Image: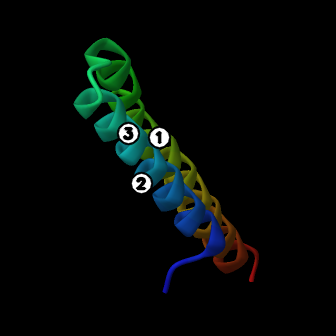
Amino acid sequence: MFKSSDLFILFAVTISFVVSAYLWFSGNREEGIFTAIWVPSILAFGLYFKLAVVNAKLNASTDKGVQQ
């Protein structure tokens, strides 16, 4: 169901969120906010490459149908 790249992205998001929460609650609020901004950025990065792979597979299957 999940590929290793998907799990890596989720792991990176989780680590970023945990570090952000730790920084926020330990009194380093600006650093916590800065680290929290990474979460949607990492998710967008993962989504972009996931869509690129799906698009490449779709184009490859379409090209096979045209050649036959």
How far apart in space, not on screen, are marks 2 and 3 (Cα)? Answer: 8 Å
- Disc assigned to residue 42: 1
Give the image location of residue 8, x and y in percent.
59, 61
Q: Secondary structure at mark 3?
A: helix
Disc 2 marks a residue whose amino acid type is Thr
Tell me how the rendering is colored: rainbow
Q: Nearer the viewer, residue 5 or 65?
A: 5
Where is mark 3, residue-wise?
39
Residue under the point 47% across and 40% down: 42
- Quarter of the picture containing the C terminus is bottom right
Where is mark 2, residue-wise?
14
Q: Secondary structure at mark 1?
A: helix
- Mark with earlier residue (1, 2): 2
How far apart in space, not on screen, are marks 1 and 3 (Cα)? Answer: 5 Å
Residue under the point 26% across and 28% down: 24
Residue under the point 64% across and 72% down: 4
Residue under the point 64% across and 60% down: 56
Pointer 2 local density, CA inside 10 Å: few below 14, some 14–19, many at least 20: few
Give the image location of residue 40, x and y in percent.
34, 37
Disc 1 marks a residue whose amino acid type is Ile
How far apart in space, not on screen, are marks 1 and 2 (Cα)? Answer: 10 Å
Residue that extends furthest to the top in the rendered view of this protein: 30
